[in-house]
Amino acid sequence: MSSEISKAVGALAIRPDQTNWTPEQAAVLRQSGINDHVTAAELAGFLHLCQRTQLDPFSRQIYLIGRWDKRAQREVFTPQTGIDGYRVVAHRVIAASGETFGYEDTMWCDASGRWRDAWLAQEPPAAAKVTVLRNGQRFSAVALFREYVQTNKDGRPIGLWGKMPAGQVAKCAEALALRKAFPHDLAGVYTAEEMAQADNPTAEERHLRRVQPGESDPWATPEPQTVAVKGRSQSAQEIADVAGTTTDQSVVKELYRQAHGEGLLAETVKTADRELLELGAYLIARGQQLAEPVPSADSRDDDAGADAETGGPAPYSYSDAIAAEPTVSKGPSEAEVAERQLRTVAARVGLDNLDAEFEQSYGIPIAQAGVQQLTEMTQLLGGVAA
């Protein structure tokens, strides 16, 4: 197979420095089935994935497929390609690196656990195994038929899964093996064969495979962190709401102490002015707004905290809010600042699954990303917001 990738030319060509879809490209994408339910963030992530994998959506090498998501109560769009797209990426990488590349014989397994190098039975195989050889290293993967098969309402295989089950499950195993062998090049995009079962009418959730009993749900939305405030459990946003309505600075200080203890200070919240800020920064600013009045001359204890020049109250600070910390904590690192900027822009464009989108695009969690990757994603989303 040639490692060259057919690319769109003219108005449809995707430039490496492009940060948003052009009107011409957007028109063709709409004709391919991407409707108005797609979010700006999903389109931005898809553009970045096309640039990284060098797969061309206008040559039908990669797709953005919408599926109904019960949790989001909307159509969620996921990038996917065919097994040929995976092979194209693998051959391109090998051609550029000068490494060796190949496969061992595909194997199929029956229900008893016996492996065969050819599947001749009428019933579907229980599993398939593919081993990819890259530069002398073996990358093996096994795909179970029951975890990937596409079915109808009665649970019977449909489409190619009913006609060519051995070939379909072998493609899933090959995709798994290729993703092991080329993790940086194939992260964030799955094959149509792997995603087929997501369309099963009986599937209540969208998974790459069904979650087995005892396993955690990788798509589950984590419960928001909460903190007890005046005897009631509160989220970071609720703490911000309380701080925005109180006129007592001591209440804001108590909110800060408790939020700090629960690790909520870095959470992004909406202020009363609809501004997006970190909870800690907002509580400090709110405390400054509610600065205590100038103390009387008899209040010597209060005078100890007064400003030496003005006689007014000392500025509200971290040390005010946290008695246990005598000094102001160190400032955030460059990566922390870049992450905060990214989360702020993501909230502005309505991207509510930033962590999943980032890991899908870069193959690593946000917590492990560098400043360059965080800044790049921020610029991509910023181009969408503009």
Image (spheres, helix red, strand yellow):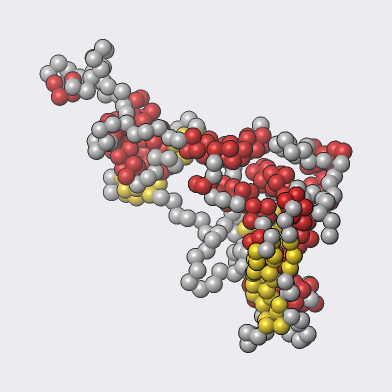
| Residue 276 in the image, given as x and y percentages of width and height | 50, 34
Q: Quadrant of the N terminus?
A: bottom right
Residue 317 seen by the camera: yes
Which residue is depicted at the point 68% across and 74% down? 129
**Near-viewer residue (295 or 77):** 77
Residue extending farthest top: 309
108 lies left or right of 214: right
| Residue 45 in the image, given as x and y percentages of width and height | 66, 45
Q: Quadrant of residue 311?
A: top left
| Residue 179 in the image, given as x and y percentages of width and height | 66, 60
| Residue 312 in the image, given as x and y percentages of width and height | 26, 17
Residue extending farthest left: 298
Location of residue 115 with respect to 281 vertically, above or below: below
Instruction: Report the number of numbered marks.
Output: 0
Q: Quadrant of the C terminus?
A: top right
Location of residue 227 with respect to 271 vertically, above or below: below
Which residue is depicted at the point 70% across and 36% down? 19
289 lies left or right of 168: left
**Near-viewer residue (333 or 244):** 333
Which residue is depicted at the point 85% across and 44% down? 8
Which residue is depicted at the point 77% across and 56% down? 91
Residue 30 seen by the camera: no
Location of residue 323 with respect to 297 vertically, above or below: below
**Near-viewer residue (243 or 63):** 63
